[in-house]
């Protein structure tokens, strides 16, 4: 995404050097309160962090000095996870109240996890008090930013919006497509005869159609004063752009250099050989293949998650992760309780991981999926302090907004294809622990246990992560002393040396071969035809054994690691073949719901859109493998034939956001 502020940087620097003038008198007073008395170009000690200060100055400049060309639709701050976006929102509120008489503030967020985090920060003015954001001689106090919540367990209603100062809500509470959402939106707008500002947190969700309509409605009403968007991932999985102007970037290298986030270190196992079994999905006959070289195994057509979710590889990966957790505990030295975060692709894998952690490794484990109640979500938010759990397993729930600094190890039991979703999830471990007794520049590590067959090289390059390959179950590391120098913080030293890159000329390639980048796929109007034409293999393949080097002497079962362990039938089908047909049908429906949920998230849509994908997928399975008859009437053979295809269906839809988008946007057309 283009940084729209770059052409203004020279004038902005002159504005800062000139003492922030021109600006409103109240703005000048507030900036001087936040600035270092010895150097107004820097934030005061123990106040805003350096990058927060730089971001706030650009927001003020965009509103008061640059003119409407920058702030007409709203401005966007792209700040890395753990960079303190909430404090920036709070500081902007105080500035708008003091300098622009903005009395009302609406904070929008995409889901309940983000809302819970914001509620904890703003409840009883906590963020204003802890960060010292209100001048002592001002007529304001934290009580002037009283919080009103909509949705969840809150009892607030549309009527409460008329006298609210700060309204925090999941965006769905303002959707015009529902009677409740329309009532809330109109109540807020009818009460907004005084100026109001909108804060759009996790703004990369904005282009969802209903989300965008709500923002347009707010922007078009009298009283609208300003919109500030914040995100750590400005680009969306569906390729759509946020409509606000990005004016500040604070990326991972800069945050690593400033010790704002933990240093990501990736650990991948040392797999030498694998043993495979091919199963004819119609006859059920299997044929074993002798061990083949690791370099040749790609031809087998395994799904990526099978490399980490079959029992033996999952046990190996968990063992490596728990070694990393032990190292994190030694580093914490009792000052905090590091926890393990396990990321699964579906509820079946999540339950298997929890069961293995609970029974085989005796690790107290919380599971958080869409099936769990609100208490599970609250337990996840308090994971580091409560002491109730040492690990949490999640499916598509704990991503943006779930901020638990004590997450010291992330175990990936799924593959990421989205350059938005992947960084969001891994980012849960990047937040530094900040508490008494922990030095602000103390090295902190986020250990990520990965698998080479998940092919996450692009992700580790994006996150500037150090990768340790060929890691054995017994390997122990002391990373703090081996991390080396911090990455440099890129800054412009001589602005006169900057050059402007001209727009490309269609008739002149400059003698260079053009770089062709495939645009993100558009939602397919002909999704039904594309879905019907998906190819399925005649044989399914499962992992029956892996050899992990350097593990002799480590006994994790009565027979140790070296025994040959055949994978259960669940590797080819999601449940045993002797399951009664009625239960099998129920599990098929459950698995298809999980596939639909993951597909809409990967395609960049809200999880609530899964209902538009779930039903078409069931109909597709019935048409393809049961002669068009609904599965509720299927014979047992057909039920198991469908079950054996679910892994392939999952792989297909995760790789076809065009089909998923078509279901969401044109499903009823």
Image (cartoon, rainbow, N blue to C red):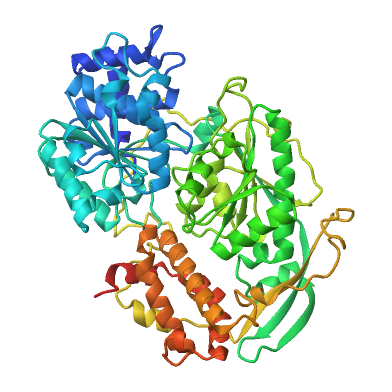
Taking the spot 22% from the left edge, 52% from the top edge, the residue there is 181
Q: How many marks?
A: 0
Residue 449 at x, y = what percent?
66, 50
Specify whether 607 is left or right of 93.
Answer: right
Q: Is residue 14 visible?
A: no
Q: Quadrant of the C terminus?
A: bottom left
Vertical placement of residue 263 versus 98, above or below: below
Residue farthest right in this picture = 553
Residue 230 sits in which quadrant? top left
Which of 65/617 is in front?
A: 617
Vertical placement of residue 273 versus 50, above or below: below
Taking the spot 36% from the left edge, 22% from the top edge, the residue there is 128
Which of 461/196 is in front?
A: 196
Which of 307/568 is in front?
A: 568
Specify whether 8 is left or right of 234.
Answer: left
Taking the spot 44% from the left edge, 23% from the top edge, the residue there is 50
Q: Is residue 660 visible?
A: yes
Residue 20 at x, y = what percent?
27, 16
Specify whether 228 is left or right of 625.
Answer: left
Taking the spot 37% from the left edge, 30% from the top edge, the residue there is 123
Residue 637 at x, y = what percent?
57, 90
Which of 515/518 is in front?
A: 518
Residue 501 at x, y = what percent?
34, 43
Residue farthest front in this picture = 155
Vertical placement of residue 59 versus 73, above or below: above
């Amino acid at each position: 995404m283009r940084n729209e502020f770059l052409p203004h940087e020279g004038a902005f620097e002159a504005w800062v050097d000139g003492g922030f003038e021109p600006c409103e008198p109240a703005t000048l007073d507030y900036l001087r309160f936040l600035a270092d008395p010895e150097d107004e170009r820097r934030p005061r000690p123990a106040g805003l962090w350096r990058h927060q200060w730089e971001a706030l100055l650009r927001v003020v400049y965009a509103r008061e000095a640059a003119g409407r060309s920058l702030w007409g639709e709203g401005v966007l701050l792209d700040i890395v996870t753990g960079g303190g976006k909430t404090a920036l929102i709070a500081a902007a509120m105080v500035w708008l109240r003091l300098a622009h008489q903005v009395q009302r503030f609406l904070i929008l967020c995409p889901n309940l996890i983000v809302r819970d985090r914001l509620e904890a920060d703003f409840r009883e003015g906590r963020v204003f008090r802890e960060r010292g954001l209100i001048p002592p001689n001002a007529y304001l106090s934290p009580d002037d930013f009283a919080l009103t919540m909509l949705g969840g367990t809150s009892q607030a209603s549309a009527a409460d919006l008329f006298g609210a100062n700060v309204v925090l809500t999941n965006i769905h509470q303002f959707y015009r497509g529902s009677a409740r959402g329309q009532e809330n939106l109109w109540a807020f707008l009818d009460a907004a005869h005084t100026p109001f500002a909108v804060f759009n947190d996790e703004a990369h969700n904005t282009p969802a159609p209903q989300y965008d309509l709500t923002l347009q409605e707010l922007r078009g009403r009298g009283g609208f004063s300003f919109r500030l968007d914040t995100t750590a991932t400005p680009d969306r999985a569906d390729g759509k752009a946020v409509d606000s102007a990005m004016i500040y970037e604070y990326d991972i290298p800069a945050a690593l250099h400033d010790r704002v986030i933990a240093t990501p270190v990736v650990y991948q196992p040392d797999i030498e050989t694998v043993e495979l079994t091919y199963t004819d999905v119609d006859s059920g006959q299997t044929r074993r293949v002798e061990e083949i070289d690791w370099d040749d195994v790609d031809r087998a057509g395994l799904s990526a998650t099978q490399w980490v979710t079959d029992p033996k590889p999952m046990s190996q990966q968990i063992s490596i992760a728990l070694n990393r957790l032990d190292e994190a505990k030694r580093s914490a030295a009792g000052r905090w309780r590091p926890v393990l975060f396990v990321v699964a692709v579906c509820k079946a894998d999540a339950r298997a991981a929890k069961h293995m952690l609970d029974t085989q490794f005796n690790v107290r484990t919380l599971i958080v999926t869409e099936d769990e109640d609100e208490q599970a979500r609250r337990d996840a938010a308090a994971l580091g302090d409560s002491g109730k759990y040492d690990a949490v397993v999640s499916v598509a729930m704990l991503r943006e907004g779930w901020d638990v600094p004590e997450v010291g190890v992330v175990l990936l039991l799924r593959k990421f294809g989205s350059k938005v979703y992947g960084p969001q999830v891994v980012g849960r471990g990047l937040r530094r622990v900040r508490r008494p007794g922990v030095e602000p520049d103390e090295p902190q590590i986020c250990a990520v246990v990965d698998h080479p067959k998940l092919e996450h090289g692009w992700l580790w390059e994006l996150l500037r992560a150090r990768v340790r390959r060929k890691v054995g179950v017994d390997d122990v590391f002391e990373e703090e002393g081996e991390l080396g120098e911090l990455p440099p913080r890129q800054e412009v030293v001589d602005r006169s040396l900057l050059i402007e890159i001209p727009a490309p000329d269609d008739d002149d390639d400059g003698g260079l071969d053009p770089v062709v980048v495939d645009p993100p796929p558009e939602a397919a109007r002909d999704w039904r035809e594309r879905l019907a034409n998906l190819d399925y293999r005649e044989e399914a393949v499962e992992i029956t054994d892996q050899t992990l080097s350097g593990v002799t002497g480590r006994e994790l079962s009565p027979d140790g690691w070296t025994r040959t362990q055949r994978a259960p039938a669940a590797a080819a089908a999601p449940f045993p073949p002797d399951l009664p047909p009625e239960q099998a049908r129920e599990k098929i429906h459950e698995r298809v719901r999980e596939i639909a949920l993951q597909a809409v998230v990967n395609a960049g849509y809200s999880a609530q859109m899964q209902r538009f994908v779930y039903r078409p997928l069931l109909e597709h399975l019935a048409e393809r493998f049961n002669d068009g008859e609904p599965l509720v009437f299927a014979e047992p053979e057909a039920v198991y034939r469908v079950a054996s295809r679910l892994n392939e269906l999952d792989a297909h839809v995760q790789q076809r956001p065009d089909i998923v988008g078509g279901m969401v946007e044109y499903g009823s057309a």
